[in-house]
Image (spheres, grey):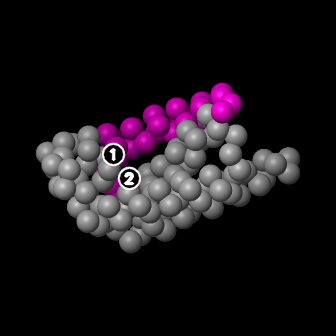
């Protein structure tokens, strides 16, 4: 375990961006797809803030987690947990499955890998 301030600052900036998107953006592109792309990067930065894990394995683990959450949305996990009346739960966990979200998550993982590869060669 090793704290990395750079990743933590990126995590905080992405978290603030995600909160602003959730609160103020109600469109058909940024909120549903850019938000999903960014959440993968956000989770990656959070993990890298505390653990010196390999880039590819971490990106794939975050992608797998995002896919799992989307699968749980397919099975209405928010209702199963009795949280359907919680706006926070519906925003954080999500309440509707969308195949296109999986593509947004994959795009987020690709951005991570390409960014880290470019940073490593610089």
Q: Is residue 95 left or right of residue 105?
A: left
Q: Position of residue 103 (x, y in %)?
A: 49, 68
Farthest right residue in view: 122
Q: Residue at x 25, y 48 (%)?
A: 90
Residue density around tag 1, few if under 14, some if 14–19, many if 20 or more, within 10 Å: few
Farthest bottom residue in view: 99
The image's mark for residue 116 is none
State which tag comes first along the sequence, 2 or 1. Answer: 2
Q: Residue at x 70, y 40 (%)?
A: 52
- In which quarter of the view is residue 106 placed? bottom right
**105 to 100, vertically: above or below:** above
The residue to which callout 1 is attached is 92
The residue to which callout 2 is attached is 31
How far apart are labels 2 and 1 at the CA level?
Answer: 13 Å
SS assignment at label 2 = helix
**10 to 95, vertically: above or below:** above
> Magenta region: which residues?
1-30
Q: Position of residue 82 (x, y in %)?
A: 15, 49
């Amino acid at each position: 375990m090793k704290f990395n301030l750079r990743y933590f600052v990126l995590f905080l900036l992405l978290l603030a961006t995600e909160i602003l998107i959730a609160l103020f953006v109600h469109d058909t592109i940024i909120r549903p797809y850019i938000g999903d792309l960014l959440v993968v990067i956000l989770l990656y930065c959070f993990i890298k803030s505390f653990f010196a894990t390999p880039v590819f394995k971490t990106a794939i683990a975050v992608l797998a987690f995002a896919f799992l959450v989307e699968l749980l949305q397919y099975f209405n996990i928010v209702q199963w947990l009795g949280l359907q009346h919680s706006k926070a739960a519906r925003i954080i966990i999500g309440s509707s499955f969308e195949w296109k979200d999986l593509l947004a998550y994959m795009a987020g993982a690709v951005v991570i890998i390409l960014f880290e590869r470019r940073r490593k060669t610089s």
